[in-house]
Amino acid sequence: MIGRLLAAEGMVILSTPLPACMMIGDMRILVLGGTRFVGRVFVEEALAQGHQVTTFNRGQTGHDVPGVEAVRGDRENRSDLPSLVQGREWDWVVDTSGYVPQIVGNAARLLSGRASAYVFLSTISVYPGWPAEQVNEDSDVYDCPPDAPGTAEDEANWSAAQYGAYKAGCERAVQEAFEGTVTVLRPGVILGPQENVGRLTWWLRRIAQGGRVLAPSQPTKSIQPVDIRDLSAFTLRCLQHRTTGVFNVTAPQGHATFGSMLDACRKVTGSQAEFTWVDDSFLVEHDVRQWTEIPLWRTPEGTWAVDSTKATAVGLTCRAIADTVRDTHTWLKESGGPSAYDRQSHHGLLREREDELLKIWDRRYSRDIVP
Ligand SMILES: NC(=O)c1ccc[n+]([C@@H]2O[C@H](COP(=O)([O-])OP(=O)(O)OC[C@H]3O[C@@H](n4cnc5c(N)ncnc54)[C@H](OP(=O)(O)O)[C@@H]3O)[C@@H](O)[C@H]2O)c1
C-alpha cells in the first residue's frame, strides 16, 4: 500500500549524510533491501570500504544506514522498480530481499544492462535433503519454476519447504533473467550483531539470567554459523573478483561447538549459569520443537555438516564464534536488540518448560535427589 502511494506520487529518494571519515569509493552498489540484518550489515561493510550504496526498500523495516542513497519503493509493485532504474545504473546489485521467483525475475530483468553483476542471497534451505543429509552445491535443489508468482508478505511464517522451494525458484529466475555475472550465495545460519531472528540473542539473554540452563545434546557437537560480517566481506570479495557460481556459505565443519558458543555467552554476560547437557533423545521424547524452541538445536545428521569448502577455496574466512558472541552481546547491550520480526516469537524455551524438563531429567537420572 505504501509502495503504491509512493509510486503514485513519484519515487522518493532520500540521501543521508556520509560520515566525513568515509571516502567515496569506486563502485556503485544497489542493495535491494538493506535495513534489517543481512542487507544492513552488508551496506555498512560496503560503505566502510568506500563504495557508493543505493538501498531500495519501502521504509517500513529498520532505519537507513547513514551514508546511503535511500530510494523508497515496493519491489512487489509493478511500477516502483521501473521508476528506480529509470536513467540510473550501478556496477553491482546485491539482492537480500528476494523470496518470490516472479518478483526476483522482474528485478533481474530490469537491472540487466544497468549493472554488471548480481549477487542473490539464497539459503541452504533450497536443498530438500538438508538437514537430513550432508549437502554440497551439487546436491538436488527444489524444483520450483523461475516465474512462480506470489507475495512475500507473510514470509516469516512460511514453512521451511515453501521458503526453500521459492528461494530455489528465485535462484533460477536470476540465473535466467540477468545478463551479467551472477553469484548465488547459500548461507546456513547467520549470526552476529543486528541478528533479527532471535537465535544467539535468545541464548545470550537466557544465560545472562543465570541458574541452571538446559543445554541441548553434547558440548562437543560441531556447529557452523557464519558471522554476518564474514558473509558481507565474502559477498564483496565475490564482486571484486568477479567470482561467479553458487556457494554454500557456512563456517567450516568443526570451526565451533555448541559448548564453545554457550561458554562464550557465559563469559561475556558474566553469568554464573550452570549448563545441564541433556540428550537429544530426551528432548525428542518430550516434543521439544527443534531449531526454534531451543534455538540452533537440531538432531538430523546433516544439520551442521554443510560442505562449504568451495567458498573457503575462493576466500571465505570465518572469525571465531567467541568474537561473534562478544560483539553480538555488545550490540544487544547498546541497542536493546533487534526490531520486531514475526520469527522472533517462534524462538526460545519458556522458563517454566525448561524447569519442568530439567526436573524430569533429574528424576530420570536421580540427579540431586536426596535419599
Ligand atoms: N538470517 C539467516 O540466518 C539467514 C540464513 C540464510 C539466508 N538468509 C537470507 O538473508 C536474507 C535476509 O536478509 P535481511 O532480511 O536481514 O535483509 P535486509 O536487506 O537487511 O532486510 C530486508 C529488507 O528488505 C526490504 N523489503 C522487504 N520487502 C520489500 C519489498 N516488498 N519491497 C522493497 N523492499 C522490501 C526491507 O525493508 P522494508 O520492509 O522497509 O521494505 C528490508 O530493508 C534473506 O534473503 C534470507 O533468505 C538469512
Image (cartoon, rainbow, N blue to C red):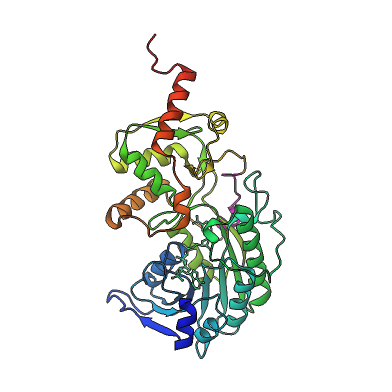
Camera-nearest residue between 327 and 142: 142
Q: Does the magenta portion include 306?
A: yes
Q: Residue at x 60, y 73 (%)?
A: 103
Camera-nearest residue between 318 and 61: 61
* Prevailing secondary structure of the magenta residues: loop
Where on the picture, by quarter, is residue 111?
Answer: bottom right
253 vs 101, left or right, is left
360 vs 113, left or right, is left
Camera-nearest residue between 156 and 66: 156
Above or below, 348 against 102 in this view is above
**Image x and y of residue 158, in percent:** 58, 57
**Image x and y of residue 45, in percent:** 40, 67
Above or below, 344 against 97 in this view is above
Camera-nearest residue between 243 and 232: 232
- Residue 189 appears in the figure: yes
Q: Which residues are magenta?
A: 303-312
**Image x and y of residue 215, in percent:** 44, 34
Where on the picture, by quarter, is residue 302?
Answer: top right
Q: Residue at x 40, y 39 (%)?
A: 262
**Image x and y of residue 301, in percent:** 62, 39
Q: Does the magenta portion include 271?
A: no
Residue that extends furthest to the bottom in the rendered view of this protein: 87
Q: Residue at x 42, y 56 (%)?
A: 195
362 vs 280, left or right, is left
Above or below, 215 against 26 in this view is above
Q: Residue at x 45, y 77 (%)?
A: 2
